[in-house]
Image: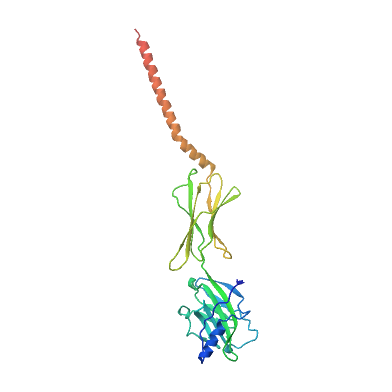
Amino acid sequence: MLLLKAGKHTEVLAPVYGKSVMEVCIFFLCAMISVPGIAASVHQVKAFLNHTAYLSCYFPNSQKIDMRDLIVFWQKGSHRVVHEVYYGEEKRDHLSPEYINRTKVDMDKWTLQLLNAGIKDEGHYECIIQHKKEGPPKVIHTSECSLHITANYSQPEIAQLHTGELKPIGYLNLSCSSIGGYPEPKEMTWLISYENTTYKHMPHMDVSQDAVTKLYNVTSKLNIPVPTNSLTNISCLLHLGEQLGILVSAPLHIEIQEKEVEQVNINFSGPLIAVVVLVALLLGFVILKKNRNILSTNQRGP
């Protein structure tokens, strides 16, 4: 999908083929002057990482001008030539090194195909079309686009950070991770649902970027009391930004029955009951022994 927004015409520096110094100077002067009504918008173009990006000139060619009368070239920024068609023939003499053998052109659609698009290819591109009737070529059309690369993140995955069985009086420590995506996501949130109620948590999201691939890895951690007495569903959501959507983890289901809670309470109070019983038995034994001593003394008498 292409979105339009207002933009400005950028400076043009293009390869020149001329016979005289004067013609060359006039050529550059024409190329760098903003022609009223030519560049009116910047088209937003998205492409997946390592796929083909399509950069169109958006040229209607209502006058049905023959390609052999046109100079068409694409450039990145103001100095890197991406592709050039010179009077119907493709020229590769002035291409920037990073674009050699990486471009194809479909002149029926006035579209440049940038092969194996990478993150380094992101940026501002311009298509310039010049027409030569009499005298030096004149700019008759320009079109600008901004290329954005997208790499799919992995589905967020929830992991438990603690070991052993969950205890009702303890805490639940979780992490959620997603790797290998681009651009940097907006945020990562948690949804905790139980008893027909959903709670949203927004803890800090840790972000790291690979120095070579430029892809991002993200992680978020959650620490909450262990839910009891009801089925609890916990999900992690990665928000990728406008038009990129949201990735949702597989839900984590937690259910601790009330009997288990009572069993824990019984187990917890068991040792205390045992101590009380033992003290009572010892006390009874002491009293019984004392009574026997008294009875023995009375029987002996004077």
- Judging depth in this view, the residue of 31 and 68 nearest the camera is 31
Instruction: Judge whether residue 186 can be spotted in this image.
Output: yes
State how many labels appear: 0
Residue at image position (44%, 29%) is: 276
Nearest the eye: 253 or 27:
27
- Compared with 74, 164 (above or below) is above
Extreme residue in the top direction: 302
Q: In this view, does 195 lie to the left or right of 287?
A: right
Q: The C terminus lies in which quarter of the figure?
A: top left
97 left or right, relative to 63? left
- Please provide percent x and percent y for residue 98: 46, 78
Q: Nearer the viewer, residue 160 or 105?
A: 105
| Rendered position, 137 above or below 180 | below
Q: Where is residue 84 in the image (x, y as percent from the top left)?
A: 52, 83
Pinpoint residue 175: horizontal percent, then vertical percent: 48, 54
Q: Nearer the viewer, residue 116 or 165?
A: 116
Residue closest to the far right: 62
Image location (x, y in percent) of residue 266: 48, 37
Quadrant of the image for the N terminus?
bottom right
Q: Is residue 249 visible?
A: no
Q: In this view, does 142 lie above or below 156?
A: below
**Image color mode:** rainbow
Q: Residue at x 53, y 58 (%)?
A: 188
251 vs 50: above or below? above
